[in-house]
Image: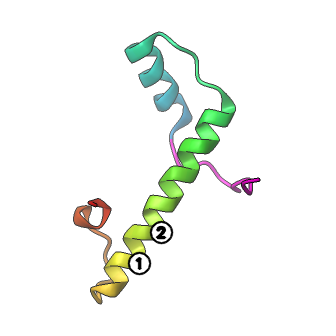
């Protein structure tokens, strides 16, 4: 079981609007939690990459595979 995050890292209204506009679908609360968890994981990986390169700034390239 995944731990529940303490805060949402995405703008819920914008995500819901995007999904509604692109697919005509509604968005569940659990989808927002899953997306926020994905953003959190990717941010943590980017921080690790920046640290490994002795930088104090996370850059776009830190999110690339």
Residue at figure coordinates x 25%, y 61% from the top left:
60
Crowding around mark 1 (Cα neighbors within 10 Å: few <14, some 14 to 19, many 20+) is some
Crowding around mark 2 (Cα neighbors within 10 Å: few <14, some 14 to 19, many 20+) is few
Counting from the top left corner in percent of width and height, residue 58 is at 32, 71
Residue at figure coordinates x 67%, y 35% from the top left:
30
Is 53 one of the magenta-colored residues?
Answer: no
Residue at figure coordinates x 60%, y 37% from the top left:
32
| Secondary structure state at the residue bearing disc 1 | helix
The answer to whether marks 1 and 2 mark residues whose Cβ atoms lie closer than 8 Å is yes
Counting from the top left corner in percent of width and height, residue 21 is at 40, 14
Q: Give the total of numbered labels.
A: 2
Picture quadrant of residue 57: bottom left
Outermost residue toward the left in this view: 61
**Start-end of magenta stretch:** 1-10
Above/below status of 10 relative to 62: above
For the residues labelled 1 and 2, the Cα–Cα distance comes to 6 Å
Picture quadrant of residue 43: bottom left
| Secondary structure state at the residue bearing disc 2 | helix
Above/below status of 17 relative to 56: above
Name the quarter where the C terminus is drawn.
Answer: bottom left
Q: Which residue is mark 2?
A: 44
Outermost residue toward the bottom in this view: 54
The label number, if any, that marks residue 32 in the structure image: none
Q: Which residue is mark 1?
A: 48
Nearest the eye: 18 or 3: 3
Above/below status of 65 relative to 16: below
Counting from the top left corner in percent of width and height, residue 53 is at 27, 85
Q: Main secondary structure of the magenta part?
A: loop
The coloring applied to the image is: rainbow
Does 19 sit left or right of 9 as displayed?
A: left
Does 1 sit left or right of 24 as displayed?
A: right
Is 2 one of the magenta-colored residues?
Answer: yes
């Amino acid at each position: 079981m995944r731990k529940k995050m303490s805060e949402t890292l995405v703008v819920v209204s914008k995500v819901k609007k995007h999904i509604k506009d692109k697919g005509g679908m509604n968005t569940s609360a659990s989808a927002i939690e899953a997306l926020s968890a994905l953003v959190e994981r990717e941010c943590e990986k980017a921080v690790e990459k920046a640290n490994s390169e002795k930088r104090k700034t996370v850059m776009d390239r830190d999110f690339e595979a």
